[in-house]
Amino acid sequence: MAAQGSRAVFDSLLAQTHVQHALLQPDDRYNEIPFTCRFQRAFMTFFSMENGRYAGNTKALAISHLFIGDAPLIYGLFSDIGRPLTLLSDGIELRTAILVMQSLTLAAVDWMEPMHELLTDSQLAAGPSAEYLSPEEILSRVAYDGRFSGVMKGGPGFHEVSNVFSDPTAKAAIVEYMQYLDTRDLDLLLQQIAALSVLLACATHKPGQPAFDFFLGRLPTCVNSTRVILESWVEDEGHKVLLVRGLWLVLLLAYATQLRPVIDGKLLVSRELAEENRSWETIYDDLRSQAAAEGRHRDFQFLRAVRSLRELSKAYEPVHGRLYLHAACKLMSQWRGWTGLGISREAMLNIRL
């Protein structure tokens, strides 16, 4: 009952924008997806008809379109740092067909040829030239790799990821760092990526100057959404590997486009966070008491991040201890807004420049 109640706290806050956020902005404007936004309604109608053809079996419908055909939609699933991915996992958890339809719609209108090219690169099947590395070890190499220097000329921002795709040297580096990923034990790998996503979201700012990157802050949600989809719907081992590789590719691209900040796990250790009375219940109480307030409790991305940390905690707490709780407490106490959007005078992460 406690688990159901805790999820209800988050979902009640997200409910008003849950469906709208896929195709519409809060002010009822359509999301601006370059070149293809005019097809959103057409795709939505198409997938609604497909749902009827599959007699309401949304799982069969989704798997069919995500992994089969000349242009499988999985290569659009990670667009906008996993918005379609998140909608798909929401649809699974809430058993809501409309969210699955919207996920497929966004994956279709923002299908990414560079993602397809990278995830189907023949070098991935060969594995690394040397040994496999853990996700954290791989990122420590990315941090000092000069092949990414100068690629993001206009500053940080995943919305400029095309700069990486159009740079042959940086693109080759991405393939190399995907090769190092050991996909032989996907459960272990997802645990490792989950822990790393928390560090990227909450432990990349300058000491004493808390800052939370908008795009890196979405990574725990991407990990949790991938976990939900893997556990609930994906059965084919090849499809599972492809999905986890897609998750890893998004994490690599996010780290590169956000200028490869220093990752410092000590930023998640403090006297306040170590207090024994800090618990998920204190977070729920805070959300309940301030649910009507403006600011963070009305920031869709903030609520999503905290909810994802809770879900990851339930899945991996026996392995990672209080890591996810500490990250959530840090967000609740120190978050004042998002950075990393390339806006003038915004707070900066701990960038090596």
Image: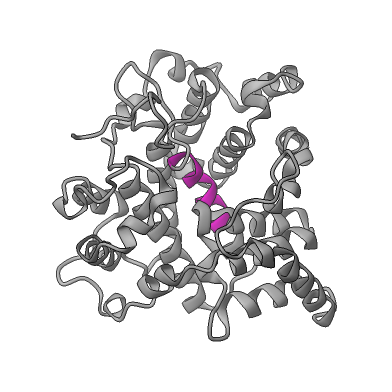
Is 223 colored magenta in this rendering? yes
- The picture places residue 291, in percent across and down from the top left corner, at 74, 23
In the figure, 223 relative to 299: above or below?
A: below
- Range of the magenta residues? 216-227
Q: Quadrant of the N terminus?
A: top right
Nearest the eye: 106 or 38: 38
Q: Quadrant of residue 172?
A: bottom left
Residue 150: percent from the left, percent from the top? Answer: 21, 47
Give the residue at x 44% y 56%.
190
Residue with the most extreme bottom position: 70
Q: Point out residue 168 in the picture as x, y percentages from the top left corner.
A: 23, 66
Using the rendered view, name the quadrant where residue 272 is placed.
Answer: top left
Question: In the rendered view, does 196 fall on the left or right side of 39?
Answer: left
- Residue 98 is drawn in which quadrant? bottom right
Report x, y in % for residue 108.
61, 69
Q: Magenta region, mostly helix, strand or loop? A: helix
Residue 90 lies in the magenta-colored region: no
Q: Nearer the viewer, residue 298 or 319?
A: 298
| Residue 99 as seen in the image, left or right of residue 140 | right
- What's the residue at 74%, 58% (across, down)? 99
Foreground pick, 111 / 245? 111
